[in-house]
Each structure stands twice: as C-alpha cells, then as structure tokens.
C-alpha cells in the first residue's frame, strides 16, 4: 500500500485565498492565466503577420495582375481590396474579417483563402501527426531501454554510441535528411515514391524526414529522465519489495519519467508542424507548406497571411494543451508559477 502511494500523482493543491478575501481555486487561476496568454499571443501573431506583409517591398496587385496590366485596372483592384486605405483602417478591417472567418480572396487564383486553407490543411496535419506518432513510438521504448541499460555507469560503450548517434541525428536539418532519403530510397533503389500523397507508401519518406530528428532528441531526454527516476527512493523501495522488473520499470519508473518529457514532446510537435514547410516542398506534398512557398513567390499576400496565422496558431494551441496536460499530471506546476 505504501508503494502504491509513492508513485501516485501528488494531491491537488488547496484553494488559495488572496488578500481580498475571495477564494480562487488554483485550476480557475491556471485556466484564466493560460487563456489570457493564448489570446495575447494570438493577437501578437495576427498583428505581426499583418505588418510583415505590408512592410515587404513591392505591389502585390501589380505582381498578381502582371507587369503589362493597365494602371487603371491595378488602381481599381487596389481600391477593391482596400490597399489605398490608411494602414490603421486596413488593420481594423482585417481584424473584423478575421472574427467573421473571412480570410480574403487569393489575388492569383481568385478563390476564397479559407477554401484554399481547408483543402490543404488536412494533408499538413496528417503529415505532422503521423511523424509525431512515429517519433514517440520509437523514442519512448528506446529511451527507456537505454536508461535501464546505462544506469549507474553500466554500458559505457552503449551509452557513447547512443548519445553520439542521437546528437548527430538530432542536428541534421529535416529537409536535408529528406533529400538524402529521396536520393537513396527513391532515386537509387526505387523502392518508394518521392512526390505527392496518392498512396500509403508516399507517406513513408516525408514522415521519416520529420520523425527521425525529433525521435533522437526525445529518446535522449527519456533516457536521462529514466536514469534519474531509477535512482529515486520509491523505485528503490519497489526493488526492496522484490517486485518484478517489468512492474518496477513500466509501472513505477516510466510514468514519472514521461511526466518530465511531456513538455519537450509538445514542443517537438509544434516544431514538426513548422518543419512541414520545408519537407512538403522537398516531397511536393500538397499541404500548407508548399502553398505558402508558392504564394510568397507569387506575392499572394492574402494566402501568406492566412497560412502564417494557421501555422502560428497551431503551435500556440499545442503548447497550451501541453501545459494543461502537464498540470493534470503534476498539479505542483501550477503552484510553481504563482
């Protein structure tokens, strides 16, 4: 019974009574604080994307209509989309349209930007989530095994090989790894397709390009946490009670090791979403990453703004969800922020 209590999550903190005499539950304070940060971060993201597009030199209307377009047609188009208005007026109209879900119209395709985003977003999310799933499924068992094998100075050669290889794989850029995989498995061996997402086999190389580096980093963190947890008192108690090794490692040590690794896992997922921009262009993947590159080249700023906001909002939302999950697993994290 004492052993079970040693690995159970800590008890939730007691309500805090501030100086005004009003009792505020820690979860309410935590939720309000996280929601406030998310709203402010989204506002900064939206404002930065708006200013970024307007500070880039060049006329997007002229670029979209072409150098031979009559000046009258260019002027009419600028007036139609509000580019002749003062910057603050444009910003106010931009925010109004965002709140109503209106992302504007593409200058090149004349399609609603929301329609373009909704068509491309599923491919990007599928790529990022599959890569994250592969990274976790590889990193957690590998990190646990390395932690068990190399604790207390055992397996020095194994630790050296694991550490050096994981550091190397962790620093290789995703797009460079993708080019290497295309050359080996697509061009030389001809085993897998190198473009599009028309078949399940087309997912293999892009997913590996995104997953290998994060899996190596996450496995190192899991190993470090596992080595630390294995030296904790409650694990020693479990061993003293002669519990089966599988129960000690998987039932007692692993949940505590993963709690500390959860924050990094969330950051990795956010980084994977952002990394799809380069990987999608390597593999001609029909997602938002390839869309934003082509839109930048065509100066289709309405699409660029929308895709930047979608990418940024995805990363912010993932980080917020990780904070909530971390607080659920370890309520002490809420107290440490007070």
Image (cartoon, grey):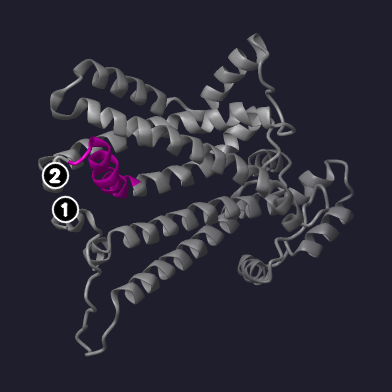
Residue where numbered disc 1 is placed: 3
Q: Which of 260 and 75 is in front in this view?
A: 260
User: x and y percent of residue 270 in the render?
Assistant: 47, 47
Badge nearest the viewer, 1 or 2: 1
Q: Is residue 60 left or right of residue 306?
A: right
Report crowding for label 2: few under 14, some 14 to 19, many 20 or more residues within 10 A (C-alpha): few
Q: Is residue 180 above or below residue 74?
A: above
Q: How many angstroms separate mark 1 from mark 2 (CA)? A: 13 Å
Q: Is residue 101 left or right of residue 76?
A: left
Residue where numbered disc 2 is placed: 232
User: x and y percent of residue 3 in the render?
Assistant: 16, 53
Image point 34% across, 57% down: which residue?
A: 326
Q: Identify the element where label 2 is drawn.
A: loop
| Quarter-of-image position of residue 49 | bottom right
Q: Which of 268 and 325 is in front in this view?
A: 325
Is the stretch drawn in magenta largely helix, strand or loop? helix
Image point 14% across, 57% down: which residue?
A: 2
Q: Nearer the viewer, residue 191 or 236?
A: 236
> Which residues, given as a range, are shown in magenta?
243-261
Image point 10% across, 41% down: which residue?
A: 240
Farthest bottom residue in view? 21
Image point 11% across, 42% down: which residue?
A: 236
Q: In this view, does 29 lie above or below 74?
A: below
User: x and y percent of residue 261 in the render?
Assistant: 32, 45
User: x and y percent of residue 130 in the render?
Assistant: 56, 39
| Quarter-of-image position of residue 254 | top left
Q: In this view, does 267 lie to the left or right of 304?
A: left
Report crowding for label 1: few under 14, some 14 to 19, many 20 or more residues within 10 A (C-alpha): few
Is residue 76 a member of the stretch shown in magenta? no
> Which callout, 1 or 2, points at the residue further toward the start of the chain?
1
């Amino acid at each position: 019974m004492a052993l079970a209590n040693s690995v159970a999550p800590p008890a939730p903190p007691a309500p805090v009574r501030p100086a005004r005499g009003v009792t505020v539950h820690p979860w309410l304070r935590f939720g309000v604080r996280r929601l406030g940060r998310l709203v402010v971060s989204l506002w900064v993201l939206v404002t930065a994307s708006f200013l970024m597009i307007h500070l880039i030199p060049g006329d997007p209307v002229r670029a979209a209509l072409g150098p031979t377009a009559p000046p009258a047609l260019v002027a009419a188009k600028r007036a139609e989309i509000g580019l002749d208005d003062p910057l603050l007026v444009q910003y106010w109209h931009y925010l109004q349209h965002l709140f109503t879900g209106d992302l504007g119209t593409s200058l090149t395709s004349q399609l609603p930007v929301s329609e373009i985003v909704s068509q491309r977003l599923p491919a990007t999310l599928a790529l990022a989530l599959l890569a994250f799933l592969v990274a976790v499924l590889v990193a957690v068992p590998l990190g646990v095994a390395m932690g068990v094998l190399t604790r207390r100075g055992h397996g020095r050669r194994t630790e050296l090989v694991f550490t050096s290889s994981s550091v190397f794989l962790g620093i290789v850029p995703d797009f460079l790894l993708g080019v290497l995989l295309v050359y080996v498995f697509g061009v030389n061996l001809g085993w897998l397709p190198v473009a599009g997402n028309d078949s399940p086999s087309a997912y293999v190389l892009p997913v590996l390009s995104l997953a290998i580096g994060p899996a190596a980093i996450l496995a190192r963190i899991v190993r470090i946490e596992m080595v630390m947890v294995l030296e904790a008192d409650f694990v020693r108690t479990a061993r003293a009670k002669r519990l089966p090794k599988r129960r000690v490692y998987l039932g007692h040590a692993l949940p505590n090791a993963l709690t500390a690794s959860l924050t990094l896992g969330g950051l990795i997922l956010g980084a994977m979403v952002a990394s799809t921009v380069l990987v999608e262009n390597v593999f001609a993947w029909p997602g938002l990453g390839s869309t934003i590159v082509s839109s930048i080249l065509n100066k289709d700023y309405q699409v660029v703004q929308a895709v930047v906001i979608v990418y940024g909002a995805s990363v912010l939302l993932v980080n917020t969800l990780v904070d909530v999950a971390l607080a659920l697993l370890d309520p002490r994290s809420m107290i440490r922020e007070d």
